[in-house]
Image (cartoon, rainbow, N blue to C red):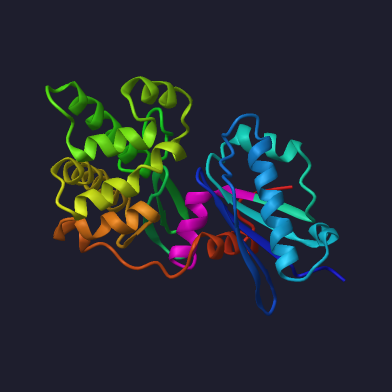
Amino acid sequence: MTSDLILAVDGGGSGCRARLVNGTGVLAEVTGGPANLMAGDGRAPFEAVLAVARDALATAGKAPAALADCRAVLGLAGATPDARSRFFAFAPPFAETCIVSDGYAALLGAFGGEDGGIVIQGTGAAAAVLVEGRLTEIGGWGFALDDFGSGADIGRRALRAALRAHDEPGAPPPFAAAVLKAAGASPQTVMDWAQGAAPRDFAQLAPRVFDAAEHGTPEAEAILARAAEETARLVRLCAAHGAERVAVLGSVGRRIAPMLHADTAALLVEPAGDAMNGAVIALRQGLGHCA
């Protein structure tokens, strides 16, 4: 008898979530470490997926051997052709493994597989539109070239602002001092830290920026205003590609959305589901790259 177990994973630069379902409903939901397929040689995201898969099975009261009974559908950041090939080369132990981009999974989940657009602002930033079955992916070019308005971008801008404030005569203002302390205390140690920091490390500074803005700190308000401009740009691009409704997703996106101007906000809707819902839709509709 073929198993009806489906493991849906939503993975990005800061962490991943997994949901184990069968024909009757949700059996387990767990969280795990980063699962961006572009990380290193691909071993780390592969291990992260296996870890949440095992945790989901254990939470559902199933033996580890049940991995071989699962149809796994993975909505992962960095799902380029080369990155997918590296993942499959590690021989995932599932009955079937399908990979789609995290954006595509989120888009399918947000509108139940129907037309619409999404803007994701989490550790990174990207957008996607589905119109009459045609997928258009927007942005998502990575931290070195893009990700404007994301948590990583907000953290990097906060550090830049703090370093510039340090160059001014006198003691730096409290916001600048707090940001520098969070990343290494002195400009010299911050430089060393930044050389080896990943996008998720920069993104960990973003909550400080939101907190400071809520307390009326002008430097923080300016950084978030820039992030709102970048988010609005992606919303407008979704509309330009044919989306009549747009959902803004992600830990940063949810906090930025209320800052958008009325003309942009008029396009926004609440998502019907999440990326794990979308991953299951992708599997059942035969979408994605499978092995």
Task: Out of 147 and 51, give the one closest to the viewer.
Answer: 51
Total label count? 0
Task: Out of 38 and 107, give the one closest to the viewer.
Answer: 38
Magenta stretch, overall SS:
helix
In the rendered image of this protein, does residue 258 appear above or below residue 189? below
Corner quadrant of residue 79: top right
Q: Is residue 156 visible?
A: no
In magenta, the rendered stretch is 99-113
Task: Out of 147 and 127, give the one closest to the viewer.
Answer: 147
Residue occupying image coordinates x 40% and y 43% = 204
Seen as rendered, the residue at the extreme bottom is 24
- Could you say where residue 227 lies in the image, as x and y percent from the top left? 25, 44
Q: Is residue 71 visible?
A: yes
In the rendered image of this protein, does residue 132 appear above or below residue 27? above
Q: Residue 281 colored magenta? A: no
- Could you say where residue 160 lies in the image, as x and y percent from the top left? 26, 29
Residue occupying image coordinates x 69% and y 63% = 56
In the shown orientation, is residue 261 left or right of residue 79?
A: left
- Could you say where residue 265 lies in the image, as x and y percent from the top left? 21, 61
- Could you say where residue 164 lies in the image, as x and y percent from the top left? 20, 25
Q: Residue 108 colored magenta? A: yes
Corner quadrant of residue 94: bottom right
Residue occupying image coordinates x 67% and y 55% = 52
Quarter occupied by the N terminus: bottom right
Seen as rendered, the residue at the extreme right is 1
Corner quadrant of residue 242: bottom left
